[in-house]
Image (cartoon, rainbow, N blue to C red):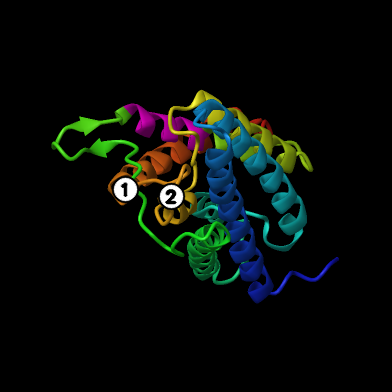
Amino acid sequence: MSEPTPLPKQLLAEFTGTAALLCAVIGSGIMAQRISGGNDGVALLANTLATVFALYVLIESLGPISGAHFNPLVTLVMWSKGQLAQTHAAQVALFFIAAQLSGAVAGAALANAMFELPLLHFSQHLRGGWDATGQFTGWGQWVAEAVATGGLLFTILRAPEGKAPALVACYIGAAYWFTASTSFANPAAVMGRMFSDTFAGIAPASAIGFVLAQAVGAALGVALAHALSPQKTSV
């Protein structure tokens, strides 16, 4: 039996993985916007491909260390299922989430730095919420985030053993295109993308709505996965 990975290494893996993921998402968005000639479809395609490839690599390489959550909602679900440390699991979950959120901000800063932008600057990209005139717009993006996050948790929980990296990367790639929000599906992604006023950014005013929608979607995804799981027929 292999020894459990020490918590500091797990936290480093979660910090590094989340930072790298956000760096890939934001950096590819900046590059795509600069070279796509104003074609948002081409820019989104490039952003999607970079995210899918990076996500697959990160899950495969860091999964054996920390489980490759990179997402506070995934961590909370794994904690609720008893898949974190047997002792002080609630503390471990909080440490994971702190590592993910700080990693997301670090990843945004790194992406901004590579393209000679201010390290951290708030996005002006409103994605649902109240606009400057006081009108509520973009509720469909909040619905999209619930769908995206529910699908992500469903995919993680229903993936056959060893298939999760590919299935999660494929799902996120597909959800970039079939959801109105381009599938953040992750409160840490919201945190990081708030700090880059670029193609992949999100305005702070839209952030709370996205996170709440993600939480609702995660609960629904978990419930569906549970409903489809085989039921015990004997003790």
Q: Magenta span covers which residues?
A: 140-150
Residue located 53% across and 30% down the image: 224
Q: Camera-side residue: 83 or 234?
A: 83
- Residue 119 coordinates in the image, percent (x, y): 46, 65
Query: CB of mark 2 within 8 Å of CB of mark 1?
Result: no
Q: Tell me the chief SS of the magenta region.
A: helix
Label 2 Cα crowd, 10 Å radius (few <14 / some 14-19 / many 20+): many
97 and 195: which is toward the camera: 195
The residue to which callout 2 is attached is: 190
Residue 209, position in %: x, y? 31, 42
Q: Secondary structure at mark 2?
A: helix
Quarter of the rendering containing residue 180? top left
Relative to 101, 11 lies left or right = right
Quarter of the image for the C terminus: give it: top right
Residue 209 on the magenta segment: no
Q: Earlier in the sequence, mark 2 or mark 1?
A: 2
Badge 1 density bin: few <14, some 14–19, many ≥20, Cα 10 Å: some
Q: Which residue occupies the foreground of this view, 220 or 127?
A: 127
Q: Quadrant of residue 31?
A: top right
- Indicate the position of residue 172 as horizontal and vertical percent values: 60, 36
**Residue at the (44%, 33%) spot, across then down:** 181
For the residue marked with disc 1, what is the amino acid? Answer: Ile
Three-letter residue code for mark 2: Val
Instruction: Name the mark on residue 208.
Output: 1
Q: Position of residue 20 (x, y in %)?
A: 62, 57
